[in-house]
Image: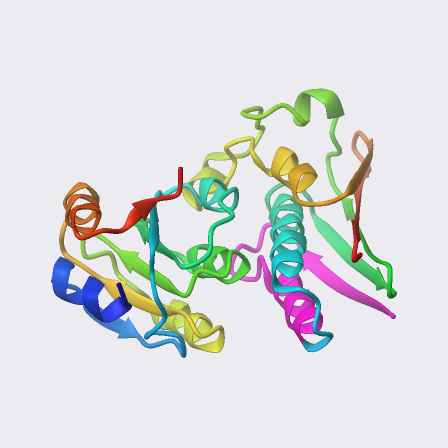
Amino acid sequence: MTAEDVIKLTEAVQVCTGNQSHNEIKYAVAADLMSDILTVNTDELLLITGMANLQVIRTAEMSDISTVLFVRGKNITEEMCELAKENGITLLQSKMSMFNVCGILYKAGLKPVF
Amino acid sequence: MEFNYEIEGGNFSHAGTASSEVKKLLKQLNVNPALIKRIVVALYEAEVNVVAHAYEGVMNVVFDNNAIVVKIADKGPGIPDINLAMQEGFSTASPAVREMGFGAGMGLPNIKKNCDELKIESEVNKGTTVTMITHLN
């Protein structure tokens, strides 16, 4: 799956395009707690979150996560976009709930990290 | 080679900038990407701890062909009981820190997991120094 597939499946919009938007995504993790994300050591990972602040982008940067999907229509600020661009991270935004997004992406083949 | 980065306590908009600089540096030096990830996750956790709990800090990074040694020294309240602080789930983080997605008591255990050697020295009402060593070979 790619970021484009995630967009279609979750009716998302691409708010910010990273330089790896065509990268394969095989796994997903959904959390609002960045401490949880930092314990995950999986590549080709999509981060699904309802937390929207700069530290989400920093967490993605440190964890080598190239695509972040914000759920519940959370606002992505200009500052977040700039930091994401600087680090080649693609930011997507869906109006769907986290539960709904997780169900759809799981059914479409994304795997859990544990 | 040796580099120093300042960390500002309480400023979450800058939290992670020092770790980000180190990540760029390690990439330029062609360090193994899996190793870079381990190192920067540990650094970022430690940097967030300084921002969350201390007034100010300095990240000192020294590396040669064998290892990367990072020392993060802060001026702050210190840790009264290091063994307790190392327990997963123990946290003294403020509600503001928790609202940012941190403060779940997972930082120090995750730092330990992501480096080869970890040393924590702390003095109450003075500060804390965290030393992380990662072997490159």
Image vertical order of residue B46 relative to residue A22, above or below: above
- Tell me if I can see residue B109 in this picture: yes
Measured as percent of width and height from the top left, residue B13 is found at 51, 60
**Quadrant, the C terminus of chain A:** top left
- Tell me if I can see residue B81 in this picture: no
> Magenta segment: does it hold B117?
no
Q: Residue at x 65, y 60 (%)?
A: B36
**Quadrant, the N terminus of chain A:** bottom left
Residue situated in front as seen by the camera: A27 or B97:
A27
Query: Hey, which quadrant is residue A3 in on the image?
Result: bottom left
Q: Residue at x 61, y 38 (%)?
A: B110
Residue situated in front as seen by the camera: B56 or A80:
A80
Query: Hey, which quadrant is residue B66 in on the image?
Result: bottom right
Residue situated in front as seen by the camera: B11 or A41:
A41
Measured as percent of width and height from the top left, residue B7 is found at 69, 58
> Magenta segment: does it hold B21?
yes
Residue situated in front as seen by the camera: B62 or A51:
B62
Would residue A34 appear left or right of B44 to someone viewing this image?
left
Image vertical order of residue B81 relative to residue A24, above or below: above
Q: Residue at x 19, y 57 (%)?
A: A73
What residue span does the magenta drawing correspond to? B1-27
Would residue A106 appear left or right of A89 to someone viewing this image?
left
What is the tally of numbered marks visible in this picture? 0
Image vertical order of residue B65 relative to residue B133, above or below: below
Q: Residue at x 60, y 51 (%)?
A: B41
Measured as percent of width and height from the top left, residue A66 is found at 41, 65
Measured as percent of width and height from the top left, residue B79 is found at 74, 29
